[in-house]
Amino acid sequence: MPASTNNIDYQQLLQSIETWSESLGFQQLGISDIKLAAHEQHLQGWIAAGFHGEMDYMHKHGSKRSHPEQLVDNTCRVISVRMDYMPPDCELSDTVLGNPAMGFISRYALGRDYHKVMRKRLQKLVDQINHAVGDFGYRVFVDSAPVLEKALAEKSGLGWIGKHTNLINQKAGSWFFIGEIYTDLPLPLSTEQADTYSQNHCGSCTSCLDICPTKAIVAPYKVDARRCISYLTIELHGSIPVEFRKAIGNRIYGCDDCQLCCTWNRFSVPTSEQDFFTRHPLDAPELLELFSWSEQTFLKNTEGSAIRRIGYLRWLRNISIALGNAPPSADTINALQQKKQAFPDNEMLTEHIDWALEEVMSYEL
């Protein structure tokens, strides 16, 4: 705690933090307590059902995820922020998804890696708080530790957790990132904001459940990650189950279907943050061009991007499935055969290329 804690006007400090936050490019900020009992119970049930798949990090930290004070000593408040990310310059998602010769990349990954952007901005916010009150206890998080970030954001009034388990804001939809600052500063809670914006407005709508290509949303507010295309194309390290390959279509990194159909996204606003603008560009790429990339080209074209985290081999794995779902052509067959010859000892990649070849060669060219 700051040495001068008794002299701090926390209401005035919060107003200053909100002003600083806005100047740093965040669209909204809220303060929550650290009581997460209900969300902890939901998480435990989700893990017990095995819905986390290979994401062992969801349970290996024990209760730290739902008890912020166990992760960071003396934490009593969480500052949550959101930042819009939909690029204003990208091709319409429906256009790309409707063209099987193209590869669809989740819109959050078209720009600079959000972890780096958000973390740097949050640190700047911390520096401004520190300048105002002196040293205090804190830790910054951006999807980087055992944090129930959506639960905390909901408690702070940034929105509600929808049936697809993404956070929705009634004035901004769901195309935004969230980040947190754990702190020992007893800031005023955003109670009124939470009462207004955390109320669930999904109603009887089931669009996200109905549209999910792999039926990963097994019930309202419950996602089986093992069926989710985002999990399959990003988190899963090995073979993608055959039963989901046709449904994946041309989605080569993530899936936005449950957000694209959400009626609340009619209120979303394209980002003005240039770091999230489309790079290289990857908003409407040709599959064959992407498949022709060498590992060096992949690393160069994904520098500073969240896409790089899956590595070159999983990148080729995902594109192989998309090519197997694409219109058959001699060029596609040649590309798949050449890539197979280039990686004769990689069983995982060979399996997916063989599947794609079987699919495209089953048609009469």
Image: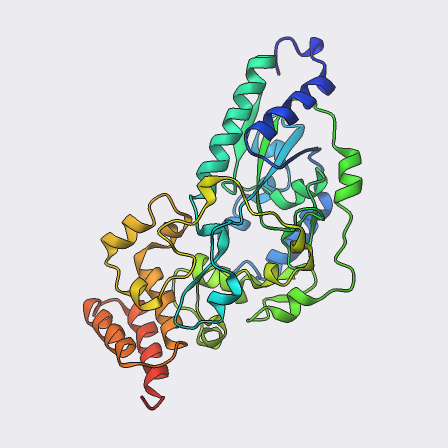
| Quadrant position of residue 5 | top right
Numbered disc total: 0
Q: Looking at the image, which residue is at 36% across and 73% down?
A: 323
Q: Position of residue 65 (x, y in %)?
A: 59, 42
| Quadrant position of residue 181 | top right
Q: Is residue 74 above or below residue 222?
A: above
Drawn side of residue 115 relative to residue 29, left or right: left
Q: Is residue 137 above or below residue 351?
A: above
Drawn side of residue 75 relative to residue 247, left or right: right
Drawn side of residue 54 relative to residue 293, left or right: right
Q: Is residue 148 visible?
A: no
Q: Is residue 251 visible?
A: yes
Q: Is residue 351 above or below residue 263?
A: below
Residue at the extreme bottom of the image, as rendered: 364
Q: Position of residue 127 (x, y in %)?
A: 52, 20
Drawn side of residue 288 relative to residue 39, left or right: left
Q: Nearer the viewer, residue 135 or 298?
A: 298
Q: Looking at the image, which residue is at 55% across and 71% down?
A: 214
Q: Quadrant of the N terminus?
A: top right
Q: Nearer the viewer, residue 36 or 312?
A: 312
Q: Quadrant of the C terminus?
A: bottom left
Q: Position of residue 70 (x, y in %)?
A: 60, 33
- What colour scheme governs how the chains and residues are painted in the rendered image of this protein? rainbow
